[in-house]
Image (cartoon, helix red, strand yellow):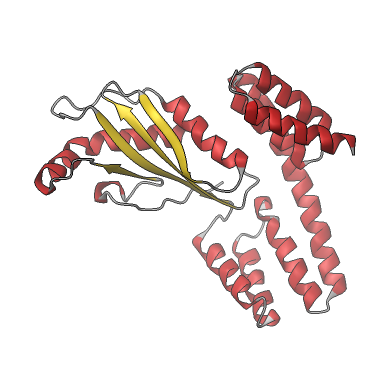
Amino acid sequence: MKRFGVFLALGFLSALPVSADCTDQYYKPAVNRTLQNVFAPYMISVKENLQRNWHPPDVIQEGHVTILFQIDRSGRIVSSKIVESSGNEIFDESALDALKKSEPFGKFPEQSPREVITINYSFDSSLVSTDKMKEYMAQSDRYYYSNKDEALKYINLAINEVSGDEKAYFLYEKRSKIKDALGDKKGAEDDLALYKDLKAKIDLKRVHAIKHQAEIENTPFAYFYLAYSYEQIKDYENAIHAINKAISMTELNNQYKRYRTELVKKYEI
């Protein structure tokens, strides 16, 4: 899954793939510029740690979540909260998990008088593998309701842009809908069948990889993610086993218990 950054505030961070904004609570222009210069290497290190420890779920085409957190002088997290949710529980949890794994972040620069810094950090990812593909998809979506032929032209360009990339399977579902709207029932059926076949292969590979990773990491989130992955292929029995494992590993498991209830309902249907 490709990660896209969103530049928020600090100029010296703009070249990095994910973005953070260190907010000085006692803003003084000259002092703030000095603090930014002092903290520049530190903030780069924070970003590198978070990116290294972040493993976004690759079942989501586009994801964005922003976390506000505070670090004390020793590099420990004082507080953290999601200020902009992705709308997907597993994606949000992956960002929080990256934050936990990155602690401690290292001590503040000695010349800094600050006791705490506040960071606004955005995690962004996409299954879209090139900027051109993203542009073609956007054009196709724009024309979908006004000119189906143009929509088809651009989705074809998107598919050609990533020819052979199995992870772009979702493009065939998009093209199937356009062909169906144009009256090409056979073409729509063929694309939908191709989408389902590629997705099944990718999902199976994904579950095997995530299961292996969960056994290595042996953390609540790893098994939560594994449960979610099993759910995607409708293997609710193994999903329940995985979420039970996550629940047994943490006391803060209300979220996991709610998810288990949902899985049990689906399994019983």
Residue 176 image position (x, y, % from top left): 77, 67
Q: Quadrant of the C terminus?
A: top right
Residue 129 image position (x, y, % from top left): 55, 55
| Snapshot quadrant of residue 154 | bottom right
Residue 265 image position (x, y, % from top left): 83, 36
40 displayed left or right of 61: left
Q: Residue at x 36, y 46 (%)?
A: 16
- Whether residue 210 is visible here, answered yes or no, is no
Q: Is residue 149 above or below residue 121?
A: below
Q: Residue at x 36, y 43 (%)?
A: 120
Q: Residue at x 11, y 42 (%)?
A: 31
Q: Is residue 248 above or below residue 28?
A: above
Q: Is residue 225 above or below residue 106?
A: below
Residue 121 image position (x, y, % from top left): 39, 42
| Snapshot quadrant of residue 236 | top right
Residue 93 versus residue 41: which sits nearer the camera?
Answer: 93
Residue 212 versus residue 74: which sits nearer the camera?
Answer: 74
77 displayed left or right of 206: left
